């Protein structure tokens, strides 16, 4: 069975003001009704940091069929966000254990405090823990003991504690786009190579073989789906999410047929995620950066682009400015957007990506 894209998809071009999240001038609220898939969607990867951001995020989620999401939010914001949700929205935002990155300069944030947070998040109902180890974490601390390395002593201690506490889903951010390894990470003596980032992960996937590991951002390697397919073959306890909209649109949007084959060859292993950052800093217009986009439209732009990538045969410009295009080639306009070619996944595959794959991973977790 295949889906057909309703004719109204993309038909609102030029009807709304232009900003960096909407170079096409789309009416994102109206466009939400122009997708064929109408089952519930789980977003496994978001960053929602305040009650106001949660409200606007859920407005966009309502429009785009996103029923439930998991967010990485500092522990201190969990209570206020939960308390702010009206009865009909209770339980739609679930929390992933992370250190409080906004307090990264404070002693203990990634060490003693983090160990306490692991237990406190669990007590608050969290059952997924995230280990972020993008190479840029080494700008913060590049020692062998850096708490932002996946296999540093403190990380391994936290991982053991998380396992003993009861977490059976670990999320990781390993590596970053190829474009970054060509630019900001060009110094491989400091940041390592891209493939080298996965060495400690492979060891830990084997060690914690009864944990489901979610590799954020197509496992960090959407550019090379052959490599990623082999990695999934080697590690049956590994699944990936398709989050980081600009990155995925730029890379998967260049190879829609290969992407479709990849998803079809890996049922239950690709989870829908957006990486929407819904922060107090972007709920309202930013006078310092009036072009940035904000609130409902900013968040909806991610849903629109990812759903277009997954379920339509769209072949055109992404509406979202992708600064990496200019970074790798300074002759490209800084406001350029990537070409987005949709993979037009069949309806049964979409249901797996949008819902069933994640539902299996979170089965049995308490949902407040
Ligand atoms: Zn993220």
Image: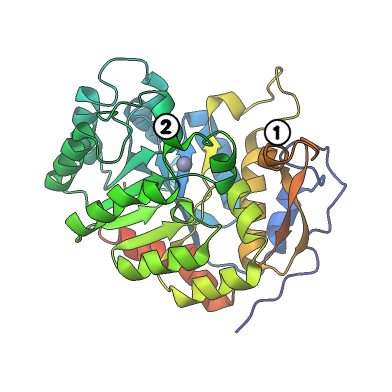
- The residue that mark 2 highlights is 190
Q: Residue at x 75, y 42 (%)?
A: 22
Q: Secondary structure at mark 2?
A: helix
Report the quarter where the N terminus lies.
bottom right
Dot 1 falls on a residue whose secondary structure is loop
Which residue is more in the foreground, 115 or 155? 155
| One can see residue 366 in this view | no
Q: Quadrant of residue 78?
A: top left
Say whether disc 1 or disc 2 marks the residue closer to the N-terminus.
2
Question: Residue at label 1?
Answer: 293
Return the residue nearer the eye: 42 or 22: 22
In this view, 126 is above or below 259: above
Q: Does 21 appear above or below 362?
A: above
- For the residue pair 88 and 53, the one nearer the viewer reads as 53
Q: Position of residue 44 (x, y in %)?
A: 43, 52
In the rendering, at what x and y percent does residue 145 appear?
Answer: 25, 29
Q: Residues within 10 Å of mark 1 (few under 14, many from 20)?
A: many
Q: Quadrant of residue 186?
A: top right
């Amino acid at each position: 069975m295949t889906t057909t894209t309703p004719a109204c998809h993309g038909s609102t071009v030029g009807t709304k003001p232009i900003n960096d999240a909407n170079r096409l001038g789309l009416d994102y609220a109206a466009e939400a009704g122009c997708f064929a898939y109408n089952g519930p969607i789980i977003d496994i990867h978001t960053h929602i940091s305040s009650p106001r951001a949660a409200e606007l995020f859920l407005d966009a989620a309502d429009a785009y069929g996103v029923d439930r999401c998991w967010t990485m939010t500092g522990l201190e914001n969990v209570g206020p966000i939960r308390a702010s949700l009206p009865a009909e929205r209770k339980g739609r935002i679930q929390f992933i254990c992370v250190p409080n990155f906004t307090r990264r300069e404070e002693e203990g944030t990634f060490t003693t405090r983090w160990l306490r947070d692991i237990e406190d998040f669990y007590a608050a109902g969290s059952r997924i823990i995230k280990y972020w180890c993008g190479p840029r974490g080494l700008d913060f601390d590049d020692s062998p003991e850096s708490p932002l390395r996946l296999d540093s002593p403190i990380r391994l201690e936290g991982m053991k504690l998380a396992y003993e506490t009861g977490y059976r889903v670990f999320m990781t951010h390993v590596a970053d786009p190829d474009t970054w390894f060509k630019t900001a990470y060009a110094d491989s003596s400091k940041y390592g190579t891209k493939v080298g980032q996965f060495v400690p992960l492979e060891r830990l996937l084997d060690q914690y073989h009864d944990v489901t590991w979610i590799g954020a951002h197509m496992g960090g390697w959407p550019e090379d789906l052959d490599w990623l397919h082999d990695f999934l073959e080697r590690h049956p306890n590994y699944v990936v999410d398709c989050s980081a909209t600009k990155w995925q649109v730029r890379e998967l949007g260049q190879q829609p047929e290969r992407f479709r084959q990849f998803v079809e060859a890996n049922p239950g292993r690709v989870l829908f995620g957006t990486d929407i950052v819904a922060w107090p800093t972007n709920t309202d217009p930013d006078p310092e950066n009036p072009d940035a986009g904000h609130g409902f439209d900013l968040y909806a732009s991610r849903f629109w682009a990812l759903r277009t990538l997954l379920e339509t045969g769209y072949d055109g410009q992404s509406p979202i400015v992708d600064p990496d295009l200019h970074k790798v080639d300074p002759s490209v306009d800084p406001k350029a957007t990537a070409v987005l070619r949709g993979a037009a996944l069949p309806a049964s595959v979409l249901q797996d990506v949008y819902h069933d794959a994640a539902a299996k991973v979170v089965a049995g977790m308490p949902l407040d």
